[in-house]
Amino acid sequence: MMRRFRTTVLLLATTLLAGLLSGSSAAQAGSPMWTGLTPCAQPELAAYLCGELTVRLDRDDRRSKTLDLPVLVAGDPQAKRTMLLLTGGPGQPGPSLAPRVLQAFEGIKNDYRIVMLDQRGTGANALNCPELQSERGGNDLRVPSRAAVLACAATLGADREHYATTDSVADFEDLRRALSVDRWALNGVSYGTYTAQRYAAAHGSRVTHLVLDSTVPVDAFRAELVETFPEHARVLRDVCAAPGRNCPGDPAEDLSAVLRREPALGPKLLEAVTMVSYFDPVRFLFAPEALHAAAGGDNAQLQQLFALVDRFSPAPAAQYSQGIQAATLCLDLEFPWGGAQSAEHSRARKADRAVSRITPEQLWPYNATAARSNGEMVMCEYWPKVRDREVGRLSLRGVNALLLHGERDLGTPLVWAREAQRDLPGSRLVVVPDGGHSLQVGGAATVRETVTEFLLR
């Protein structure tokens, strides 16, 4: 999850295509290196073509070390159109997800070549911070320990200032040039929607179509996450209003009652309800029942819910890098204490003051502890200051965009999609009833048909 940041392939000649598929192109000193595309060596990726883009960690220093970014191409390698598919996080890989993810794009495989890559710090060359990875796994809202955060920052050292979204956007542009693509479509999922929008804002003339699935807005949401709290109430009540659900009470009122009795549970409940929305958006498992029992003083089912979330949370760095999660979020986000260069000693005081100004009505059904001590807020409060690079006001006017959003997605709530749509004049927002996170993969066929129609027009 993210918050406010300060703020087609042309038809190639036969000889050019042969060079692209078979070998590397010469690069000037300091320029990115590109291997070209050859059949992937991994057995599970045998149906695809693979290559590697090598970029500088620090784009302003030709002596900087380099990063190798694996690239995978599916679909028709000679197609007139290209789509860059951007995965989420920050922290998810690209090529290793291809066998599962690319099934969603059968409708365009004869018209597009579909490109995936490991964004810097992810996948095969993921930033690995063992303690932080062990504590958070694949969970964005898990509250980390100070020791794990500081150990991760020490592992990355001064390099940690080169993992901002701005750096990834520049990598995408290098990839476009390496592929000899004039214009292409971008399709982002979750955090991938943010990077896709950032690329479109910087290189709008290069973008033919923009698909945003489970949208993160490019501007104006808060570290305290209070704008998402009413969405939790709405979704929980919607789940319980479904035919046959028969919840024992009002789950939003029950959640509020639990936190009146045990305020310290705020961050854990925010994490648990959000995670449940990822893997069971239709029924929300037994979360409403657990909240009702806990509101009456019986926490047994609530502890079972927490244990279930714990069981689904572990993930290795190659699958979901918490190192890149910390390095990117703590660089890019705007917190109550300011940006990444803010003095560390004043962060807690400024965060406390900001949360004290939020009204109980704004916090409901959660509480001030959930706002002040959610996992993202805590992680970046502990993250040592690092040189900041401000990003000017971003404009997405004129971008041809389709937004897809699940009505019950709490990882990237519907309020974010509506906000993003306002920044994309003329865009279309498709809201899927009962839908959850990441609608193109494993979602309804009608969603994939909508995307296919949009991309082929």
Image: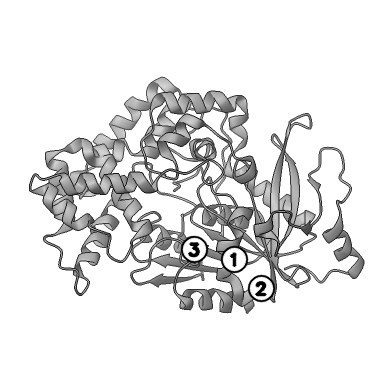
Percent position of residue 414, x then y? 37, 61
Find numbered disc 2 in the image and state the secondary structure of the residue it sits on.
loop
Considering every residue shown, the one lying at the far front of the view is 43
Of residue 338 and residue 372, the one placed in the foreground of this image is: 372
Of labels 3 and 1, the one closer to you: 1
Q: What residue sits 34% from the left and 29% below the top?
A: 350
Q: Counting residues from the N terminus, which is met first, the one under dot 2 or under dot 1?
A: 1
Q: Amino acid at mark 1?
A: Leu
Mark 2 and mark 1: Cα distance apart in space: 9 Å
The residue indicated by pointer 1 is 102
Q: What residue sits 40% from the left and 20% below the top?
A: 345
The residue indicated by pointer 3 is 213
Q: What residue sits 32% from the left and 55% below the top?
A: 276
Find numbered disc 1 in the image and state the secondary structure of the residue it sits on.
helix
- Residues at marks 3 and 1 touching, judged by CB atoms closer than 8 Å: no
Considering every residue shown, the one lying at the far left of the view is 296
Mark 3 and mark 1: Cα distance apart in space: 15 Å
Percent position of residue 338, x then y? 44, 33
Q: Which mark is residue 81?
A: none
The residue indicated by pointer 2 is 109
* Apparent side of residue 436 relative to residue 392 in the rendered image (left or right): left
Find numbered disc 3 in the image and state the secondary structure of the residue it sits on.
strand
Quadrant placement of the C terminus: bottom right
Q: Counting residues from the N terminus, which is met first, the one under dot 3 or under dot 2?
A: 2
Of labels 3 and 2, the one closer to you: 2
Considering every residue shown, the one lying at the far top of the view is 345
Q: Amino acid at mark 2?
A: Lys
Percent position of residue 258, x then y? 15, 45
Q: Counting residues from the N terminus, which is met first, the one under dot 3 or under dot 1?
A: 1
Q: Residues within 10 Å of mark 3 (few under 14, many from 20)?
A: many
Q: Amino acid at mark 3?
A: Asp
